[in-house]
Image (cartoon, helix red, strand yellow):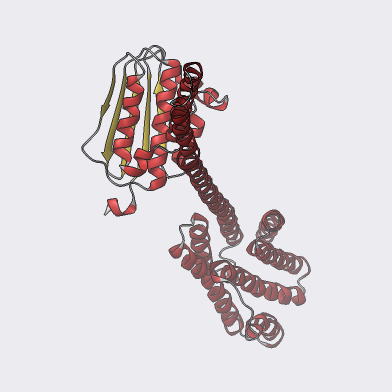
Amino acid sequence: MRSAVLELDAAILQAAITALAGGLCFALYARYGRPHFAWFGIAWTMYLARLFAILAFMVQQDPHWLYWHQVFTGETALALLWTAIGFSRGAQWRNIYLLAVAFPPLWAYLAIYRMDNFLLAAGPAVLFLSVATLATGAMFLRYRLANPSSGASMLSVTFLLWGLHHLDYPILRARGVWTPWGYYLDILFLLGACAGILLLVNHELADGLRLRTEELEYLQRRMVRQHEEERRRLSLALHDETAQVFAALKLELGAIGERVDEALRKRVARAVTLVDTGLTQIRDVTHDLRPSLLDDLGLLPALRSLVGEFASRREAVTTFDAPESLPVVSDEAEVALFRALQESLSNIGRHASDAPVRVVASTDRDVVRLTVSDNGPGFDAQHLERLETAGHLGLAGMRERIASVGGDVRVTSAPQHGVTIAIEVPLAEDSKQ
């Protein structure tokens, strides 16, 4: 009597946990729309019907409930196998599968109503259940071997062990040896499956986040590329068209100045001076838009020139240390490094105009590193995020540009100890070989 009560209590506990598992899977399906979550929910619903059938049989001792218990047991195993097949490689229905679906009700009928030999009746049903469950574990294992998924690992281990556990039914559980511990073991397998499902959710969310990140990085690279192409176009237009117009205007003014009286000649000379100023400004703008050195001579001379121009405008010591050559990086990475140095020097000019500056270009394994250090007033590094968010220092744009080429920017600073900006970009694939 006590054994029957314990078995009933264990079955009720398992039914409650199964109902929660089914509700969880249907909620996941409603949230994410993945078919395997719906099929997990259907499988646990069938498993719940199986438990209700065995509970009814324990109370009423009616063999009809035992029949339905056997039917739902087999169909649950098939639903779980179908879920695993659909998840691991995509499920496509074939009519031959109807034979598997028909086996549980047909064999349950024979076993419950037509056979007297227990082992003969239970053997094929247990073998069917075990094979289906082991195949479910194998499907998740197959997926795990092709994809790094902790959820698939958990599910494969759970269903493989569960499938082996089914084989002890004719020997142990049917003879009452496992009562009520067999129910608790099934509960552990059920909880293991739920843990695997939740890990699948986490893995799929991580995959979705990774894909979104890759898309954003691609869009960011495309925006940077389009931005630089537009700057190049404007630079060429100013250099090849506007500057040429100014140069022609200067020649015309020079010719006019030779043919007018002294009073007008001074005014023409003044106009020529204004044209010269305009040409200088155009050259400065075209250089800022797209430095010709970067296209004509390459990255290292362009960086050296940029530091040289910065040093010529200040009295404090400015040094540039670099090897004789740098490995090849992509065109986008070259522009990103140049713009990052440009922004870094601009920050120093605004915030540490009297501080010595050191710029170092180097290589380390698979990256080109550019380090810009000053001995200025510095700032509290704890406020760096706030400064970036507020648009100070230009670091947000620098990070976006460097990140778009797969690089990284690190900023270190402390009050009265200056600022160091370390910028890294990856080498081009050809340089890594």
- Left/right placement of residue 7 relative to residue 267 reads right
- Left/right placement of residue 433 relative to residue 87 reads left
Q: Which image quadrant for residue 8?
A: bottom right
Rendered position, 212 above or below 372: below
Q: Residue furthest left?
A: 324
Q: Quadrant of the N terminus?
A: bottom right
Rendered position, 173 above or below 195: below
Rendered position, 410 above or below 11: above
Residue in the image at 71% along x and 84% along y: 109
Viewer-closest of 318 and 22: 318
Q: Quadrant of the C terminus?
A: bottom left
* Residue 340 x/y as whole percent: 42, 33
* Residue 195 x/y as whole percent: 57, 53
Q: Which image quadrant for residue 335?
A: top left
Q: Residue furthest bottom?
A: 114
Viewer-closest of 203 and 287: 287
Residue in the image at 58% along x and 74% along y: 129
- Left/right placement of residue 188 relative to residue 283 reads right
* Residue 231 x/y as whole percent: 49, 41
Residue in the image at 50% along x and 33% along y: 397
Residue in the image at 70% along x and 66% along y: 42
Rendered position, 393 above or below 45: above
Specify whether residue 285 is in view.
Answer: no
* Residue 388 x/y as whole percent: 52, 26
How many numbered callouts?
0
Viewer-closest of 412 and 248: 248
Specify whether residue 374 is in view.
Answer: yes
